[in-house]
Image: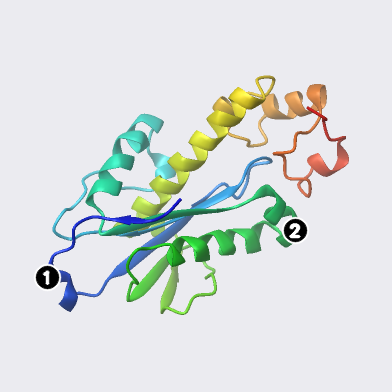
Amino acid sequence: MSAEASCVSVWWIATALIAGVDEAGRGPLAGPVLAAAVILNPQRPISGLADSKILSESKREALYPVIIDSALSWSIASASVEEIDKLNILQATMLAMQRAVMGLAMQPDEVLVDGNRLPKLSIPAQAIVKGDSKVGAISAASILAKVTRDRIMVAYHKDYPDFSFHLHKGYGTKQHLAEIEKFGCLPVHRKTFAPIKYKKLSQR
């Protein structure tokens, strides 16, 4: 998905552009890992930004278009299941974050990343533990990444109706594990994750 930017006034020229970056989907057994980068517009503050994990689904969905409309620039990127299996989930997450920053329509002066690790960037960056609850731009990025990934998982349910991806979003819930046991593994499952690597791949 390409980045888009809202109209930019001349005021920001003398203001440091800070991009917040976060991911969604490191833990699930299926689907890509998503990352988003957001440069907020101080002249268009967004009420209600918070760590996406503590917001309800309806609140995240409501904030999603507000962030896209209000931000100076935003970008959403992913690393595929194949990349996760090839690189490992940590490196795939870093790759998705790197892609998200590179996809911004304007280059930030600094990047603030949720967590304790940084992707390879040519821009000054800081890792901030629990940044999604401390920095508005990271909160916004967490919401974009989470909503986008959830929408992908809902689409998976339409492709694979035996699996309740619209409910468990690919996480290793009791329901999901029972579905894997009954129906086998799908192409969208991460083959290097237990218990997937011990199961037979479904041909559906």
Disc 2, SS: helix
The label number, if any, that marks residue 11 in the structure image: 1
Badge 1: residue crowd in 10 Å (few <14, some 14–19, many ≥20): few
Q: Position of residue 153 (x, y in %)?
A: 56, 34
Which quarter shows the C terminus?
top right
Which residue corresponds to the image point at 74% horizontal and 29% vertical from the top-left?
Answer: 177
Which residue corresponds to the image point at 58% horizontal and 59% vertical from the top-left?
Answer: 93
From what the image shows, is residue 92 above or below residue 165?
A: below
The answer to which of marks 2 and 1 sits earlier in the sequence is: 1
Badge 2: residue crowd in 10 Å (few <14, some 14–19, many ≥20): few
In the rendered structure, the answer to whether residue 79 lies left or right of residue 22 reads right
Residue type at mark 2?
Answer: Lys
The label number, if any, that marks residue 137 in the structure image: none
Disc 1, SS: helix
Q: CA distance from mark 2 to mark 1?
A: 44 Å
Q: Position of residue 83 (x, y in %)?
A: 69, 56
User: What residue sits right under mark 2 in the picture?
Assistant: 86
